[in-house]
């Protein structure tokens, strides 16, 4: 059932590049299977897909209280509750309740400021439609670049991520939830698999490698990141 739900999610347009309209799919294919939709707000467009998901028949969508939403977190809960209320879709949640939660976490959040992505990030970016870096990995990779003194090369790293992903067989395409991806009949945690791609992207930029051809031409003399080597040794999941 899980595999079928993921197939529905992939087929119906969870892939951000193609967008989602309520006419793009129907839950009639799996009438008894609950559909749960998760996304991130990296592009700044996280609320709209969640509204369309419910219109298309999704049973539940992920959100974050307003003061913790946006960027690589989830879309605003308050915005979604208000939008669904306007359409007559009951959520069992009140805007007053969301506001109370939001105000609490707004006061608590500064205590965790040193651990936040906002130490290095100030906004999301719509170029996620091009490089397709998963939300959690976007935050981690940006902090890695910051820690390694490569912040000024961030645009090159994102471009390299696209190339590195394709060199790994386009593994980001198979991401079906924030915590896993399907490879054949096995489920592999997406955090280590997308991190492998990120490690190679950083490595490429550090070594002035812009294309797959550049990497292949020097492969015999390069000392690749351990995570990349272990990926191709099948330490993550099973080959298909």
Image (cartoon, rainbow, N blue to C red):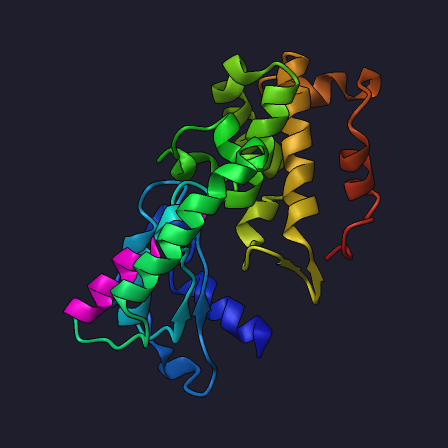
Question: In the rendered image, which quarter is residue 142 located in?
Answer: top right
Say whether residue 149 is left or right of residue 86: right
Q: Residue at x 63, y 58 (%)?
A: 180
Question: In the rendered image of this protein, does residue 84 appear above or below residue 75?
Answer: below
Magenta segment, principal secondary structure? helix
Q: Position of residue 13 (x, y in %)?
A: 38, 59
Say whether residue 31 is left or right of residue 20: right
Magenta stretch in the rendered image: 73-86
Q: Residue at x 39, y 76 (%)?
A: 59
Q: Position of residue 208 (x, y in %)?
A: 63, 11
Say whether residue 184 is left or right of residue 7: right
Question: In the rendered image, which quarter is residue 2 located in?
Answer: bottom right
Question: In the rendered image of this protein, does residue 113 appear above or below residue 235?
Answer: above
Q: Residue at x 51, y 27 (%)?
A: 119
Q: Position of residue 174 (x, y in %)?
A: 57, 54
Comparing 208 with 41, the one in front is: 41
**Quadrant where the C terminus is found in the figure:** bottom right
Q: Position of residue 196 (x, y in %)?
A: 69, 38
Question: In the rendered image of this protein, does residue 226 appear above or below residue 150?
Answer: below
């Amino acid at each position: 059932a899980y595999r079928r739900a993921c197939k529905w999610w992939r087929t119906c347009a969870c892939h951000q590049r193609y967008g989602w309209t309520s006419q793009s799919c129907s839950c009639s294919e799996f009438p008894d299977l609950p559909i749960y939709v998760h996304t991130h707000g990296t592009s700044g467009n996280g609320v709209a897909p969640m509204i369309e998901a419910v219109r298309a028949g999704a049973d539940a969508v992920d959100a974050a209280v307003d003061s913790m939403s946006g960027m690589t977190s989830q879309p605003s809960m308050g915005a979604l509750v208000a939008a669904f209320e306007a359409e007559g879709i009951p959520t069992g949640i009140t805007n007053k309740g969301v506001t109370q939660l939001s105000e609490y976490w707004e006061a608590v959040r500064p205590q965790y400021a040193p651990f936040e992505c906002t130490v290095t990030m100030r906004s999301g970016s719509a170029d996620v439609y091009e490089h397709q870096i998963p939300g959690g990995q976007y935050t981690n990779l940006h902090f890695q670049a910051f820690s390694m003194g490569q912040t000024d090369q961030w645009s090159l790293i994102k471009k390299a991520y696209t190339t590195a992903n394709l060199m790994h067989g386009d593994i980001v395409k198979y991401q079906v939830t924030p915590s896993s991806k399907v490879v054949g009949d096995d489920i592999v945690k997406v955090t280590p698999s997308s991190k492998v791609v990120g490690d190679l992207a950083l490595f490429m930029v550090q070594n002035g490698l812009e294309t797959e051809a550049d990497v292949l031409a020097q492969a015999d003399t390069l000392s690749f990141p351990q995570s990349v080597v272990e990926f191709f040794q099948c330490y993550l999941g099973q080959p298909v």
